[in-house]
Image: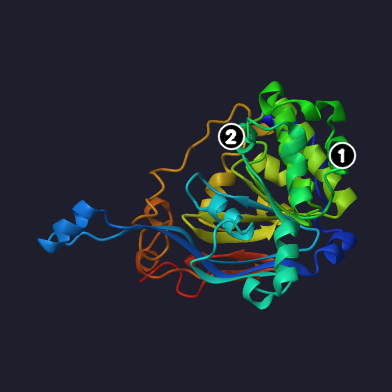
Amino acid sequence: MSRSDAANAIPERDAGSPALRALTAAPIVQLEAVSKRFVKPLDAAARIANWLGAGQREQVVHAVDEVSLEVGEGEVVGLVGESGCGKSTLGRVVAGIHPPSAGRFRYRGKTFEEMNAAERRQATLEVQMIFQDPMSSLNPRLRVRDIVGEAPVYHGLASKAEMGGHVAEVLERVGLDPVFMQRYPHQFSGGQRARIGIARALAVNPRFLVCDESVAALDVSIQAQVLNLFTKLREQLKLTYLFISHDLSVVRHLSDRVVIMYLGRMVESAPARVLFSQPNHPYSRALLANVSSLASRHMRFAPLSGEIPSPLNPPSGCHFHPRCLHAGPRCRVERPVLTELGSGHLSACHLNSPGGVGG
């Protein structure tokens, strides 16, 4: 089975249905100009060199740069971009693994500073993350029973006596036989380990799941099964997803809305059907031009020219201008803002603003 065939096995979301619009009316997560920077301090040798006038500075990685985003309750938002664009870091900020360096993160309308202790605990449990490689994210020394059941017991959602029954119920929900709970991670296939990772997240009754390349390490024939599981769980448990992936063919069939990131910035956001039929940003158009499908099996794909710049020293103005065929003088000095193009369609490109890309 090819990757495109696997994607076609997933039922496409009807992003325009009235029921879905009602479901996604209230935002569960809000990001307000969120940035995340990682700073590598100077070591002893560099500090000594600076005393002698070397002028070395701390290295700062601009992983996420002023991203504003809302995710409605019950919505599936696909977050897409090349490796190194900051999408996984943004997912970790949403999951509470990394605190933002700047900006505000709100869950159900409140920042963590505005919540009391009980609300913070509840928010921590309701937002869970599923990681890309289950083999490295599952403790190889623990049995599945402990991997899935440890957190519910710790947080008081189940007693030690109830842990076995709770784990069995969660394993059955993700399509695994409860008799497997006494096994170790290495005794499972890749698809089964992916289901264990999903079960671990579901064990604390979450409302919002951050899925970081959760099917990228799987064979394409298994991907469709796991993605169908995500769809079923969404409907059964009323879950909300931030689905991070580099595979647009998967995102197209799973997401209600798609957000495109480039070098730490959000460059376009639109309902899935709109973005795939009418992409606006040059980067989005370039990505979509290289999506494989049944109709394009004999096409010759043209990759984006140049390498993605380093987040240690991002370009000025529009970060995409060194690789953009439409770049002009304005793109090199002025950062484009997200502009409303239609209902729910935003794009950050000077081509959409008065004056265009000229100086």
Residue in front for this viewpoint, 157 or 113: 157
Residues at discs 1 and 2 in contact (Cβ within 8 Å): no
User: Secondary structure beneath disc 1?
Assistant: helix
Rendered position, 224 above or below 270: above
The residue that mark 2 highlights is 136
Sequence-wise, the earlier of marks 1 and 2 is 2
Rendered position, 259 above or below 222: below
In the rendered image, residue 90, in percent from the top left (x then y), is placed at 57, 57
Q: Residue at x 40, y 65 (%)?
A: 331
Q: Residues within 10 Å of mark 2 (few under 14, many from 20)?
A: few
The residue that mark 1 highlights is 173
Residue in front for this viewpoint, 127 or 308: 127
Q: Residue at x 40, y 50 (%)?
A: 323
User: Secondary structure beneath disc 2?
Assistant: helix
In the rendered image, residue 99, in percent from the top left (x then y), is placed at 54, 63
Q: Amino acid at mark 2?
A: Ser
Q: Residues within 10 Å of mark 1 (few under 14, many from 20)?
A: some
* C-alpha span from label 1 to label 2: 23 Å
